[in-house]
Amino acid sequence: MGNLIYCELLKLKRSKMLLISFLGALVTPVMIIIDGVRTHFAHPEVVLKLSTLFDNCQFYTMILFGLIVYTVISAYLFNREYTEKTLKSILPVPVSKTSFIASKFCILWIWIIVLTVITWASAFALSIIFNAVFGLVEFSFGLALKWLAKMLIGSFLLFLTISPFVFIAMRTKGVVVPVIASAVIVMGNAFLSNEPLGALFPWTSTSLLISGKIANTGYPYWLVIGLIILVSALGFITSFVYFGKEDIK
Amino acid sequence: MTIGFLLLFVFRLIIKVRLHEKQFAKVIERKEAMEYIIETNNLTKQYGKQLSVDSLSIHVPKGKIYGLLGRNGAGKTTAMRMLLNLVRPTNGAILLFGKDYLENQKITYSKIGSIIESAGFYENLTGYENLQILSLLRGRHSKDMVNHALEIVGLEKETSKTFANYSLGMKQRLGIAAAIMHKPELLVLDEPINGLDPIGIHEIREFLLKLCKDEGVTIFISSHVLDEIEQLADIIGVMHEGRLIEEVDMTKLLERNRQYVEFEVSNLSFATRLLEEQFKISDYITHNDKTIRIFDCLEKRGDINRCFIEKSLVVTKVNISSEKLEDYFSSLIGGGGIG
């Protein structure tokens, strides 16, 4: 498995997708800082906190950009083996199909962690500038670190709920369908993020879990977590079973 | 008396056992002589209603080059994919190195090198990096091994060029390098010369022949180009519409399909004597009482005919065979050409 993961890392050498995803990870921090500047000038009486900036950053990443960026990454990771016709070279080595898919999921998780750290680091760097120029309440590195932990947990939950898109990407062997599917989910997120029903929608409930808003929805934690586990299990199982049974053409 | 019968019984028993041992040894000997590296039995693949491979039973002996010939869509690639465990058979059995192909896959497949159609590699990586990935996955990576494979196919100088910028021929060469890099005992090559220039084709052909002859590598190669297979293979299998319609030794096939001039003469023994004495021809066969087929010196058929007539032989028929190997395969698969 170690070799497989190392090979997955090697495969990313010179990959433009790396740069694109890094830029994608910067979108949310830049957006929340611009929003902070706008708020500062529009409503000077509003006191901005560091935790508010990170909370917004976390929310938009999990609800909007993260979902789409990670779907594109997973579609790229899994589909490139079909588009570049490499499976017929790799599998007869021999490489077990289960290990192969498992290594892909591992690299997807690593990639998501790296992007989360980039998002956090850039958000923190921008908040330092914001603090220096406009001032921020409760600004401390310790608080920022606490948010890093929260964001990493959030990214893991997002990784779990991305798995159905992996199956869609493998089944359709393209990027378009999974991206459309994730866009539909994003629309659902936008609609449900301020509704109690959001707790029953796994892609929204992950964000509500991290921001501690599940209790406000009135739904029990076991149901919310159970639905997240169900969706991710469905994604993982269908991906493994489909790839295991698929004929490589 | 009883002791005598007992001795006779023991003596007969010993003889029987020794005879049985001899027969058993003969069976083993025969089995060793016919050791197959690839053996399929009724291998079938069906996609929906379409039967891509139909009851394929092939036998690839150790250390030989087996050429699988057939038109595009005959089922060659699907058969090879099944051998490489890329496609699951609908029915039938596959034996690789004498064992079921799903048994000890790690050991079995580490002894196989393959190319299936066009080479598939990561476009953002160089040739070296692509081979590095394969050797890492095999668990025995060494720089020398990768460099040596690149040297063999003449790609050692393309160190910074990524696969996306390779020409079609270079891509195919890299595929060959990947297939031979780990010194496999069996090569499964599906249309390996696609995209190569004539010099490249010649080089690869010579290399494959050398691999087979010097290192005893068994090669299972498919092509729709008859000429290519003819120059390489020891055994030819012809596939058509998913079925194996012929599996034949190349030497026998060439013999069967050699061009000849046929004379029908009044005195066969006199005619053969004339051939041997006047023309020094010994490569001929006789048919019934009147016909003689000459495989050598076909261009001298006019002189031979004149000689027969001058020596008062009655020549009732002169016929030159028109069937070449290509015609033979065309007649087999019922089409105008192989490809």
Image: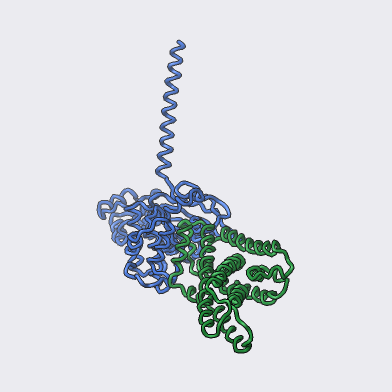
Chain colours: A green, B blue
Lateral position of residue A85 relative to residue A163, left or right: left
- In the visual, does B193 lie left or right of B239? left
On the image, the x and y values in percent for residue B177 come to 38, 62
Q: Does B277 sit above or below residue A160?
A: above
Q: Single out the residue that lies furthest toward the right.
A: A218
Q: Is residue A167 visible?
A: no
| Left or right: residue B273 compared with residue A210 | left
Q: Looking at the picture, how far across and down is residue A210, in whole percent?
A: 63, 69
Image height of A98 relative to A72, above or below: above
Identified at 50% across, 69% down, the residue is A114
Q: Residue at x 34, y 70 (%)?
A: B158
Q: Residue at x 50, y 78 (%)?
A: A125
x%, y% of residue A50?
A: 58, 77
Depth order, front residue of B123/A198: A198
Which sits in the foreground, A123 or B232? Answer: A123
Establish if B69 lies above or below A208.
above
Query: In x, y percent, where is residue A222?
Result: 70, 61
Q: Residue furthest top?
A: B1
Q: Is B239 situated above or below B122?
A: above
Q: Place residue B231 in its image quadrant.
A: bottom left
Asked if residue B130 can be seen in this view, the reply is yes
- Residue drawn at point x = 66 percent, y = 62 percent: A230
The part of the image, by quadrant, that contains residue A179 is bottom right
